[in-house]
Structures are given as structure tokens and as C-alpha cells.
Amino acid sequence: MGNFSRISTEHAQGMLKEGNAQLVDIRDEQSFAAGHIEGARHLDNTTLQSFIEEADPDQPVIVYCYHGNSSQPAASFLNERGFEEVYSMDGGFEDWRSQYPVKQP
């Protein structure tokens, strides 16, 4: 199993505000389309390979899902694929949405 760290929404927000991280959303496509964190890239089985090929493996990656559970194995997977610094965001999108604005369609 790959290495990853868990990160709070507050710490994630700080990293993103400073431009120090790549953000990926692993929720289903309909949920992503209905609202997501600004700057997030949607990852699913059809976009995963292109993300792995195009993303900077040396820049931190923050992975989020609905509540912070499914993002943990996804973060581990990305670490196994060469991403050095990977985080799973605790509380996921629901926690973020309760504190910060989200991008709406």
C-alpha cells in the first residue's frame, strides 16, 4: 500500500490558496458537475491515466471524495504511481462545502 497523509480542509485550503498543490475530485461525474472545489480535476477510470501522464509527480496532490473515506485508497494508489506527496482530505467535499465556497455550474 502506498504512503499518503491525511489533511484537514483548513490545511488543504491553505495549500491551494498558495498554489502549492494539485487537487483531484474522485466523486462521480454528476456530483462533480453539480459542484466542486475550484481548480479540482475530476478523476475517474477514463481520466486517471491522462492525469498520471500529465500531472507533476513532484507537486503535492490532494485527493477528495464525499466524506474523506474513498479518497484514502485513491491517494495510496497515486503514491504507488510515483506521486511523492499525496494527501487524502478528511471530511471530503461535504466538510469543505460547509466552510468554503464551491464552484457551481
Image (tube, rainbow, N blue to C red):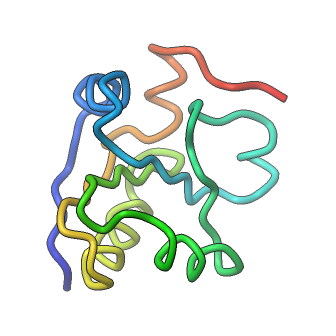
Query: To which quarter of the image does residue 45 belong?
Result: bottom right
Whether residue 29 is situated above or below residue 97 in the rendered picture: below
Q: Looking at the rendering, in which quadrant would you find the N terminus? A: bottom left
How many numbered discs? 0
> Residue sitting at 64 percent across and 36 percent down?
36
Whether residue 4 is situated above or below residue 66 in the rendered picture: below
Residue 35 point in image, percent of width and height: 72, 33
Residue 7 point in image, percent of width and height: 22, 41
Whether residue 2 is situated above or below residue 102 in the rendered picture: below
Q: Is residue 99 left or right of residue 32?
A: left
Residue 87 point in image, percent of width and height: 26, 53
Q: Looking at the rendering, in which quadrant would you find the C terminus? A: top right
> Residue sitting at 28 percent across and 37 percent down?
20
Q: Is residue 30 left or right of residue 50?
A: right
Q: Is residue 45 left or right of residue 1?
A: right
Residue 101 point in image, percent of width and height: 57, 15
The residue nearer to you, when weighing 96 against 21, is: 21
Q: Is residue 49 left or right of residue 11?
A: right
> Residue sitting at 45 percent across and 14 percent down?
99
The residue nearer to you, when weighing 33 against 93, is: 33
Whether residue 37 is situated above or below residue 1 in the rendered picture: above
> Residue sitting at 80 percent across and 37 percent down?
34
